[in-house]
Image (cartoon, rainbow, N blue to C red):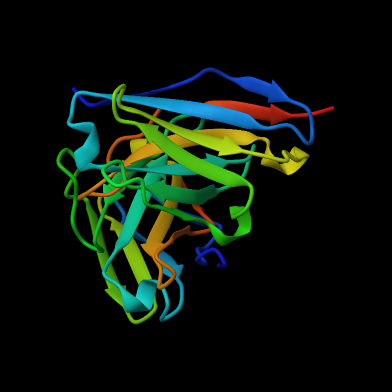
Amino acid sequence: QVQLVQSGPQMKRPGASVRVSCKASGYTFTIYGISWVRQAPGQGLEWMGWISTSSGDTNYAQNLRGRVTMTTDTSTSTAYVELRSLRADDTAVYYCTREGSPPADYWGQGTLVTVSS
Amino acid sequence: QSALTQPASVSGSPGQSITISCTGTSSDVGGYSYVSWFQQHPGKVPKLMMYEVSNRPSGVSNRFSGSKSGNTASLTISGLQAEDEADYYCSSYTSFRTRVFGTGTKVTVL
């Protein structure tokens, strides 16, 4: 069965960087893209960006460009998102989703990233 | 890219029908048939309920239906049930080749 398993919770200081992983199984990794979505505590969903797992092409939300990088390792069917220069308002649950048709049909379990001094 | 506009809350009694609206612009909702809807119960992972405006993924009840007119998409839940109480988010592809989510709607079953 399709699964997206994300790395565990992390706590970071303001100004630091964080990397979250998302390991896919149960399907051919390079057929579907991966998107990242985050949700601040008590807030709505925010689309962060998308990566093509076959070509590595990316497209990021405008408000995160310059601070975010999405990558994949096809040898391990794992996607990564790195966010730099962390601020308190980056505190959120970060989700990876499988992108194809239908879009976002499978989600990872979520990774809580807390940014606090 | 501004979030799509949804009502903060919608409520209905069991068995009734409710409709959640999702308003964007011609650069997102109005320009593409790539509107999705997600259901999120408290503390849970979002679940895809509708895609490409009116397509239901396998396993989603046919009590859920989607439509679009101009810059506004809608999700209708008919025969409202207690288990439908959750937050609902719309999402659309945009002319910037990005996606944008709606502000979210809390559905309450009275």
Q: Is residue B89 above or below residue B25?
A: above
Q: Is residue B86 above or below residue B56?
A: above
Residue A57 shown left or right of residue A84 in the figure: left
Q: Quarter of the image containing the C terminus of chain A?
A: top right
**In terms of image quadrants, where is residue A56?**
top left
| Residue A116: % across, % down | 79, 29
| Residue B36: % across, % down | 32, 56
Residue occupying the far top of the picture: A8
Q: Residue at x 24, y 61 (%)?
A: B52
Can residue A81 be seen here? The reply is: yes
Q: Residue at x 37, y 64 (%)?
A: B93
Q: How many marks?
A: 0
| Residue A55: % across, % down | 29, 47
Residue A85 shown left or right of residue B1 in the figure: right
* Foreground of the two, B62 or A1: A1
* Foreground of the two, B99 or B67: B99
Residue B95 shown left or right of residue B69 in the figure: right
Can residue B81 be seen here? The reply is: no
Residue occupying the far right of the picture: A117
Q: Quarter of the image containing the N terminus of chain A?
A: top left
Q: Residue at x 19, y 23 (%)?
A: A26
| Residue B90: % across, % down | 41, 57
